[in-house]
Image (cartoon, helix red, strand yellow):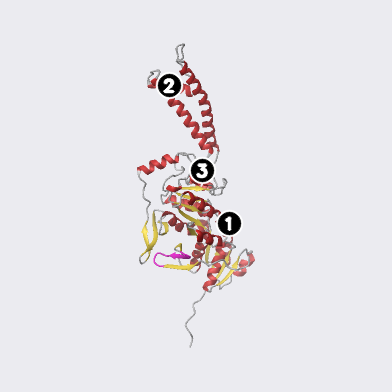
Amino acid sequence: MDGPASVRRLHAVVIGDTEIARLTCAGLEERGDLVEHLPLPTEEEVRSALTLDVDAVAVLIRNDVSVLRHCLLVEHVRPGIRLVATVFDRTLADQLVRVVPNCLVTSPAAVSVPSIAGACLADGLLAVERYGDGAGARALRDGPVGVEVIPYSVRRPSFRAVASSAAASLRPHDDATRILFLGMTGLLAVLVASVVLTKTVLHQRFVQSLYLATRVVATVGPDNVTPKTSNWYLLFSSGAMLLTIAFTAMFTAGVVNRLLSSRSVGIVGRRTVPARHHVVVVGLGQVGLRLALHLKALGVPVVVLERDPLAANLRLARASGIPVLSVHAEDRGVLRRLSLHRARALAAMGSDELDNIEVAINALADAPDLRVVLRAGEDEVIAETRSLFRIGEVCDVAALTAVAVMRSMLGGTPGTVYPRNHEIAAFDGVTEECSVAQRRCRCPA
């Protein structure tokens, strides 16, 4: 008598030399699936691997154009095959889906951002995601009988909080803005002092006092000078005009610098640096930009720190009204000016894990109660550092994406993926499935 029918395992092809590709390969092999991993394949190698018994293909390459090329090749060789790809650029992703409808397109940023946002906004939130074309938002949290799905809305700040934040946002965050503010403050101080003196001492009408003060600030001098004019008034006017020359030069230099530079922080408007109930995002890579956009869509004030003034995503952030400071986030002086003690969280999303740890340590030195979220992997340095003291919630973007890719390759719904202790969990709206985050495979590079 025959035994019970065995479950047919997946025959998959994984293309790419990224950490996500190696984790996906290791995860499928752990299930007992047959996996052929092609780290840097040629066109002929891809054609040879796509035999008739292949069930699914994952294209996990960093370069979006290379992903497009390989997806088109796979579709040409095996039309209609289950295909999963990671693409960051949304325009290219839309075009790829239009040309290859059977291709499921995702990205590390799209997979990981909901769980990172949940960790930034409140303790106990597994993820915060948007739905209905961004019209609404919902949060996942631990409940007494499993995962609960609840509506999420950001509490609107009070008038006092808005006024306090607006006043704090006027603080200069760079030398050029500091010079502009100093020049403008000096000019206003000279104007007010001249108005007060001419009004109280010379007993002029307010309009006349304002006119005389404006002439002093404009360095054309008062027009009421007579032989009987007091010497102190002449000395004051002379000194005020000399000071005005210096303040005007500083103010003009600041204005010219702001007009000619590609600055991504505004003095007023939507790109001002928030000072209360905000999230500080470090790093303007794919994950950092998508996280900032996600938080902004949820109504959470956000500011991004990026060391590279020519970062590729800087233009997208500026067009979206996200303030970006071109500074080194490891500098405690920079962090101190960002009102971390009034912030919701700091999210260190840089590509270098050790830099993220350094940022977290410096931030916690100034704000010990600050909620910190780290982008990091399974590096031993991360585990050793966490064993010494709390450095924040650690988010392994590669492991989250690998789990989502595997679920898609198996024909399921990726759902919402989030870290849970030392596991990666996926919630499809009804059930939660947990899996242990695997280390990379041992396939040759």
Q: Kindly give the residue lying farthest to the front in the view shown.
A: 388
The residues tagged by marks 2 and 1 sit, at their Cα atoms, a distance apart of 64 Å
Q: Nearer the viewer, residue 229 or 97?
A: 229
Q: Nearer the viewer, residue 5 or 427?
A: 427
Q: Is residue 71 visible?
A: no
Instruction: Identify the image quadrant of residue 44.
Output: bottom right
Q: Nearer the viewer, residue 156 or 414?
A: 156
The residues tagged by marks 2 and 3 sit, at their Cα atoms, a distance apart of 37 Å
Picture quarter with the C terminus: bottom right
In this picture, residue 35 sits left or right of residue 273: right
Disc number placed over residue 65 in the picture, else none: 1
Mark 3, residue position: 264
- Residue 190 percent across, percent down from the top left: 46, 26
Q: Is residue 393 visible?
A: yes
Asked which secondary structure carries label 3, the reply is loop
Sooner in the amino-acid sequence: mark 2 or mark 1: 1
Sooner in the amino-acid sequence: mark 2 or mark 3: 2
Disc number placed over residue 54 in the picture, else none: none
The residues tagged by marks 3 and 1 sit, at their Cα atoms, a distance apart of 28 Å
Magenta span = 421-431
Q: Is residue 212 above or below residue 340?
A: above
Which residue shows up at 38% across the image and 22% down it?
A: 206
Instruction: Identify the image quadrant of residue 21.
Output: bottom right
Pointer 2 with pointer 3, Cβ within 8 A: no
Mark in the foreground, 2 or 1: 2
Mark 2, residue position: 211
Q: Is residue 276 above or below residue 191?
A: below
Asked which secondary structure carries label 1, the reply is helix
